Amino acid sequence: MPALRIDEIEAMVDLILFDIDGTLVDDRDRYWSLASARLRAISDAAGREAALTWAKLVGVNPDTYEVDLAGPLSKAPRRDDLAVAAAALYQHDHPWHKARELAQKAYDEADSVQAQGYTPKLYSGAHEALTRLHQAGFRLGVATNGETRITSGVLKDLKIDRFFDVVVGADMVVEGKPAPDMILEACSMLDVEPGAAAYVGDQPTDAQAGRSAGLALVIGVGDPGLKDAGADVVLKSVAELT
């Protein structure tokens, strides 16, 4: 089993799991694209006023498509995000069952538009870091609040899918992060004990999930305050993983 050493901390781990948005992928750029596609799709499905209500509830500026990175579009599991969208449509005289149907249709349409016209961007140094870890013998995986199918598509578009042995989204578990469910599911799928795994993420919910899962090492990226949420160490970016 290879050793992962960061500063004075060393852990023998077989599996390193990653969050995606904000950790490996430029989340601001990706969410801007997603917000614009969803706003148009909801406007087409239910009208401009309903789309504006949706934007307010999920944390989107309808004029600039800027996304609140602490809001539902950015941080909620897809099923929760869809429920918020349906609630917005319900406020505009759509019965609940119809609102759910329209929200699902609009989100599926936005996914299709984004998949055809947008290529996600890896953070600088992320590809090199994944290559190093893979060549060193670590197994790699993804545990994300996003949907498994969409996440797998993003990894393929970025040409990094070959690095990952497992991808677990919130749709595969009962509770998304900060619950440890998806991390534990990923470990179980590869028959790895949580004590032989590490998790890398950029949000307090990532650190909380990793800590609750009982992992050998929880690595934060970006915000030094992640140590208060349970991270053992915080790096500037995944490019520092060696």
Image (cartoon, rainbow, N blue to C red):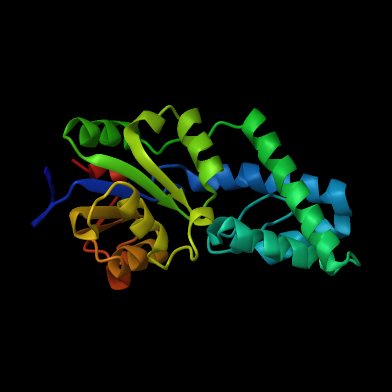
Quadrant occupied by the N terminus: top left
Please name the residue shown 76% across and 63% down the image. 86
Question: Which residue occupies the extreme right position in the image?
Answer: 93
| Residue 237 visible (yes or no) | no
Of residue 157 and residue 8, the one placed in the foreground of this image is 157
Find residue 110 and report its image quarter. Answer: top right
Image position, residue 197 (x, y; %): 23, 53
As drawn, is 242 to the left or to the right of 144?
left
Please name the residue shown 80% across and 51% down the image. 42
Image position, residue 239 (x, y; %): 28, 40
Image position, residue 41 (x, y; %): 79, 45
Please name the residue shown 76% across and 55% down the image. 103
As drawn, is 240 to the left or to the right of 143?
left
| Residue 104 visible (yes or no) | yes
Please name the residue shown 68% across and 59% down the image. 82
Q: Is residue 82 above or below residue 22?
A: below
Quadrant occupied by the C terminus: top left
Find residue 204 and report its image quarter. Answer: bottom left
Q: Is residue 92 above or below residue 152?
A: below
